[in-house]
Image: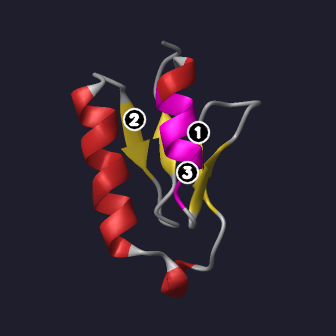
């Protein structure tokens, strides 16, 4: 993950990049996740061709290292 993308992802209030795994994880409970931020992050990752999946807690799980 490049530094610019990581910086943008860490600017969201309900998500942060896990440095050990490059996953984007929620910092809130499932009920408190900001849906607008979730959709923005999804769009950012898609436009960066970042390969990910979404788990049951609405975390973005990296499928391969970029």
Residue 52 numbered tag: 2
The disc, 1 or 3, on the residue closer to the chain's N-terminal end is 3
**Considering only vertical position in the picture, is 50 above or below 14?**
above
Give the number of the disc on residue 11.
3
Mark 1 element type:
loop
Secondary structure mostly taken by the magenta-highlighted segment of the chain: helix
Disc number lying in front (1 or 3): 3
- Mark 2 or 3: in front is 3
User: SS of the residue at dot 3?
Assistant: loop
C-beta proximity under 8 Å, tags 2 and 1 = no
Which residue is drawn at the image coordinates 49% and 40% (left, top)? 8
Where does residue 66 sit, x and y in percent of width and height? Answer: 48, 12
Q: Which mark is residue 23?
A: 1
39 lies left or right of 30: left
- Residue 32 location, x and y as percent? 53, 84
Q: Does the CB distance between marks 2 and 3 fall below 8 Å?
A: no
Residue 36 located within the stretch drawn in magenta: no
Instruction: Decide if residue 37 is on the left or right side of residue 49.
Output: right
Distance from Cα at disc 2 to Cα at disc 1? 8 Å
Chain part drawn in magenta: 5-12
């Amino acid at each position: 993950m490049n530094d610019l993308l990581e910086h943008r992802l860490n600017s969201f209030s309900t998500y942060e990049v896990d440095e050990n795994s490059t996953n984007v994880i929620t910092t809130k409970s499932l009920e408190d996740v900001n849906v607008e931020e979730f959709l923005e992050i999804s769009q950012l990752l898609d436009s960066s061709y970042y390969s990910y999946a979404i788990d049951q807690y609405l975390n973005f799980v990296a499928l391969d290292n970029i």
